[in-house]
């Protein structure tokens, strides 16, 4: 039994296999041939494993090429994905006229806008910007439209009607928005860097803005809103410099002191407050009005604040003067009915 087992020992080759002995092989030659056969078998096995992976990679590559081709084809057939049309008003108007008469073209333009939501492709972004430009030129209203996450930098939307549109996270950097109507539009996290509005616009308040006041040197603007905040803005850059929180209801009125160091505000919470622009702190809160405060104004020397309060058929209807330093009510004027 031991001798039989030895003959079957291939790697030790204590006894040669029959095929080796018949061929006149020595032990070393038989061992090398056995390794060669095993190597070929292993290589074949690896090829079998790699074939599905190579096929998958090829399919993925082909699909990617197809997607790129489809994307380019969509834009190529309209000729609007390679370059912005902002400097080609004749082409914009030509496509706008066609879109008004061709429902299929209108759908193609909207498809380009939708496509930009799911890709960062430059072709898609240019196509979407030009599509919006053409749709706007065609008189299409964007009111109430779901434009979240669109990627359309440089779109020409002058005079666009976008009331109530959802533009959250939209990329409209460098877009032209002169005289665009954006009442109650959602602009949370929208990219508007370099956007042109025809006039400086400040975005940040989350509700109706009721009042605004320039600083004495004209470099800043204070604003009050129904979001219960007072904010200060840089006129040149449009950046928010400060936000003052403390009012518990709508802010109806704001006023900058002449030297630009303080802002006064009046609110539906029946209070008048004074804020320090440099430290971002609330300096004073004036309590005495029994109804909402509609107006506030600093005296020329900045030592006093006047406020007005009341409502139709309501109470108060007074004007009061306050000492900024002490917080005391100096005067109350009654007479308005």
Image (cartoon, grey):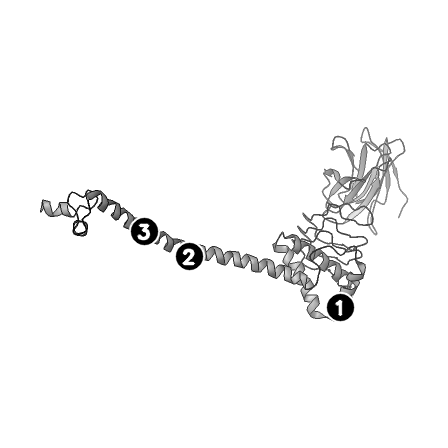
Report the disc number at residue 34.
none
User: Picture quarter containing residue 275?
Assistant: top right
Determine the residue positioned at 80% across, 36% down.
263
Residue 314 pos. (x, y %): 82, 49
- The mark tally for this picture is 3
Determine the residue positioned at 79% across, 63% down.
93
Q: Is residue 231 visible?
A: yes
Q: CA distance from mark 2 to mark 1?
A: 49 Å
Q: Is residue 150 visible?
A: no
Report the disc number at residue 52.
2
- Mark found first going from the N terminus, 2 or 1: 2
- Residue closest to the eye, 244 or 110: 110
Check disc 2: other Cα within 10 Å, few if <14, some if 14-19, many if 20+: few
Residue 237 pos. (x, y %): 78, 40
Report the disc number at residue 40.
3
Report the disc number at residue 98.
1
Check disc 1: other Cα within 10 Å, few if <14, some if 14-19, many if 20+: some
């Amino acid at each position: 039994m031991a001798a039989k087992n030895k003959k079957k020992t291939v790697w030790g080759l204590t006894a040669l296999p029959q095929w080796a002995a018949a061929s006149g092989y020595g032990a070393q030659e038989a061992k090398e041939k056995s390794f060669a056969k095993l190597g070929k078998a292993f290589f074949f096995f690896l090829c079998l494993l790699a074939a599905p992976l190579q096929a998958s990679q090829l399919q993925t590559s082909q699909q990617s090429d197809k997607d790129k081709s489809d994307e380019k084809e969509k834009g190529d057939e309209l000729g609007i994905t390679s370059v912005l049309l902002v400097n080609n008003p004749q082409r914009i108007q030509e496509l706008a006229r066609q879109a008004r008469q061709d429902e299929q073209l209108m759908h193609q333009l909207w498809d380009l806008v939708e496509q930009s939501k799911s890709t960062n492709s430059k072709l898609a972004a240019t196509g979407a910007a030009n599509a919006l430009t053409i749709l706007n030129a065609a008189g299409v209203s964007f009111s109430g439209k779901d434009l979240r996450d669109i990627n359309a930098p440089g779109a020409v939307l002058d005079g666009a009607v976008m009331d109530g549109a959802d533009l959250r996270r939209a990329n409209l950097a460098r877009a032209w928005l002169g005289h665009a109507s954006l009442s109650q539009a959602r602009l949370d996290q929208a990219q508007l860097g370099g956007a042109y509005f025809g006039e400086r616009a400040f975005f940040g308040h989350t509700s109706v803005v009721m009042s605004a006041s320039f600083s004495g040197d004209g470099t800043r603007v204070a604003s009050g809103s129904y979001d219960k905040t007072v904010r200060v803005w840089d006129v040149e850059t449009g950046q928010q410099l400060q936000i003052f929180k403390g009012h518990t209801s709508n802010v109806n009125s704001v006023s900058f002191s002449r030297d630009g160091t303080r802002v006064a505000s009046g609110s539906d919470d029946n209070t008048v407050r004074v804020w320090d622009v440099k430290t971002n702190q609330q300096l004073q809160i004036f309590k005495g009005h029994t109804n909402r405060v509609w107006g506030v104004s600093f005296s020329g020397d900045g030592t006093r604040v006047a406020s007005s309060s009341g409502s139709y058929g309501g109470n108060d209807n007074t004007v009061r003067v306050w000492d900024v330093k002490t917080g005391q009510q100096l005067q109350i004027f009654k007479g308005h009915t």
